[in-house]
């Protein structure tokens, strides 16, 4: 049984892992009692003889871990963990709200939301007005007919979003 005051010091951080090792790292860390989250989504993949649903990482090569300074070295001992993601020389801290939003959006069955095009250009900063990422500030990387590629600055993650209200 863990001491509740110890959990208060834990924060979400991101670790960079070897390609195609996200789910394995999550499983190994959880077996050590470390809370880990590798967001995946189910997609249909077609082979020559069949169509199959597979779970693929939403953010390839990244796993989120809820940890403190004491557990960081333990996490780095995993053979597939390359390093923590750093921001300004320190491990990047990810807010609980951001992890919860990722979990929420992945639970939604219908992720499509209406988009309002406003002659967006690469480099524009936009505020997402509705949906699971409502209130988040994002930078436009690419604007296509039915999709917009944005980067969530707080996570440093690039997402291609279809029909989102900006």
Image (cartoon, rainbow, N blue to C red):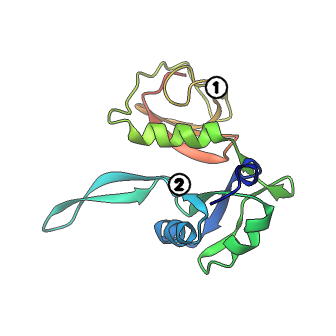
Question: Mark 1 and mark 2: span between their CA atoms?
Answer: 21 Å
- Horizontal side of 138 relative to 163 (left or right) equals right
- Which residue is found at the position 58% from the left and 43% from the top? 99
Q: Is label 1 or label 2 in front?
A: 2
Q: Residue furthest left?
A: 49
- Horizontal side of 71 relative to 88 (left or right) equals left
Of the pair 2 and 140, the residue shown nearer to us: 2
* Residue 90 appears anywhere in the view: yes
- Which residue is found at the position 55% from the left and 18% from the top? 118
Residue 76 spot, x, y in % from top left = 70, 74
Residue 94 spot, x, y in % from top left = 69, 46
- Which residue is found at the position 64% from the left and 26% from the top? 126
Residue 79 spot, x, y in % from top left = 61, 81
- Classify 156 as above or below 81: above
Secondary structure of the residue carrying tag 1 is strand
- Horizontal side of 74 relative to 129 (left or right) equals right
Of the pair 3 and 11, the residue shown nearer to us: 3
Of the pair 126 and 95, the residue shown nearer to us: 95
| Quadrant housing residue 32 | bottom right
Q: Quadrant of the N terminus?
A: bottom right
The crowding category of the residue bearing disc 2, from other C-alpha atoms within 10 Å (few below 14, some 14 to 19, many at least 20), is some
Residue 71 spot, x, y in % from top left = 73, 67
* Residue 151 appears anywhere in the view: no
Residue located beneath label 1 in the image: 126
- Horizontal side of 47 relative to 159 (left or right) equals left
The crowding category of the residue bearing disc 1, from other C-alpha atoms within 10 Å (few below 14, some 14 to 19, many at least 20), is some
Q: Going from the N terminus, do you reach mark 1 or mark 2 first?
A: 2
Residue located beneath label 2 in the image: 59
Q: Residue furthest right?
A: 89
Secondary structure of the residue carrying tag 2 is loop
Q: What numbered label is drawn on residue 110?
A: none
Q: Residue furthest front?
A: 1
């Amino acid at each position: 049984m863990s001491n509740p005051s110890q959990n208060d010091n834990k924060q979400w951080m991101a670790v960079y892992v070897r390609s195609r090792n996200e789910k394995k790292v999550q499983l190994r860390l959880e077996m050590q009692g470390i809370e880990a989250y590798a967001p995946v989504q189910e997609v249909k993949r077609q082979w020559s003889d069949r169509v199959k649903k597979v779970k693929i990482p939403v953010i390839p090569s990244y796993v989120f871990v809820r940890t403190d300074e004491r557990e960081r070295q333990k996490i780095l001992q995993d053979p597939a963990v390359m390093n923590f993601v750093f921001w300004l020389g320190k491990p990047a801290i990810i807010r609980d709200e951001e992890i919860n939003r990722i979990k929420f959006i992945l639970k939604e069955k219908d992720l499509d939301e209406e988009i309002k095009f406003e002659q967006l250009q690469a480099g524009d900063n936009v505020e997402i007005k509705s949906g699971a990422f409502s209130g988040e500030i994002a930078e436009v990387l690419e604007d296509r007919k039915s999709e917009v590629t944005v980067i969530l600055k707080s996570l440093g993650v690039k997402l291609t979003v279809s029909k989102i209200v900006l």
